[in-house]
Amino acid sequence: MEAIEFGQDFIPFLRSRGMPKQPRLFEWCAGPAFIGFSMLGHGLCETLCLADINPAAVNRCKSTVTLNHLEDRVSVYESNNLRSIPTSERWNLVVSNPPHFIDQYEGDIRAHDPDWAIHREFFNTIHPLLTDDAVIVLQENNRGSTVETFREMIDAAGLEIVFTHGDHKKLTRESVFYFIGIAKKGAAVPPWAR
Ligand SMILES: C[S@@+](CC[C@H](N)C(=O)[O-])C[C@H]1O[C@@H](n2cnc3c(N)ncnc32)[C@H](O)[C@@H]1O
């Protein structure tokens, strides 16, 4: 299943970079949170925060928490982007496989980000929720974007790209998934993300 493969991609990638266990991980646009729960299960984070706009996805996350007795380690929010996230949240690491396309899949909230408005709002509102040395790792699709699609919006939000992995310079005809690593501008970026 495609979504499960997405989740599993993050684990070897972050391990290969030597990322140590993170105190608090946030999965943005989490859906059923395959990525976040896998990372918690593999010991890549101590606690987990999840959010999605879709109540069905949020309910799925809550069931997983209950069934696995994870109430003391996992928080779940129904939230349009970061709008309903408590201001007390502080994340060391953020991961996501967000909607990947502006010009395809109109009406499908899993895939369509009209005008990149969801990405732009995320970049513009995340700064106060990050620790000073936090890293954001997004999995994007070269069929819908290149790194340059996001560079200006990241810069305008006071953030900067610290690494990219697996990306092509031009849009591809087939799906090619790539990672983009982002930190606060001027931050002491942890060695694994440099
Ligand atoms: C590509 S799916 C990824 C789901 C999951 N991470 C995975 O890999 O299976 C994108 C997710 O973004 C969510 N989403 C779309 N727009 C959103 C918004 N404005 N705020 C929060 N989540 C949103 C969708 O509900 C969907 O679960």
Image (cartoon, rainbow, N blue to C red):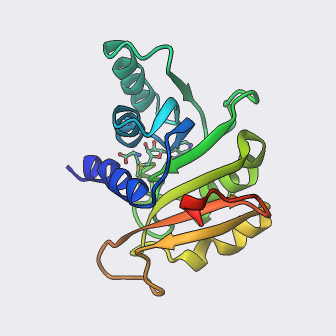
Q: Residue at x 41, y 75 (%)?
A: 142
Instruction: Give the answer, above or below, for where 97 lies relative to 36.
Output: below
Q: Residue at x 67, y 30 (%)?
A: 84
Picture coordinates of residue 14, whole percent (x, y): 43, 55
Instruction: Give the answer, above or below, for where 57 lies relative to 193.
Output: above
Residue 187: image quadrant is bottom right
Residue nearest the viewer, comparing 163 with 141: 163
Picture coordinates of residue 32, whole percent (x, y): 37, 35
Residue nearest the viewer, comparing 18 with 103: 18
Q: Residue at x 34, y 48 (%)?
A: 7
Residue 64 shown left or right of residue 79 in the figure: left
Residue, far left:
1
Picture coordinates of residue 36, whole percent (x, y): 42, 38
Say how many tags the image has: 0
Q: Residue at x 71, y 27 (%)?
A: 86
Picture coordinates of residue 50, whole percent (x, y): 51, 33
Q: Quadrant of the C terminus?
A: bottom right
Residue 192 shown left or right of residue 61 in the figure: right
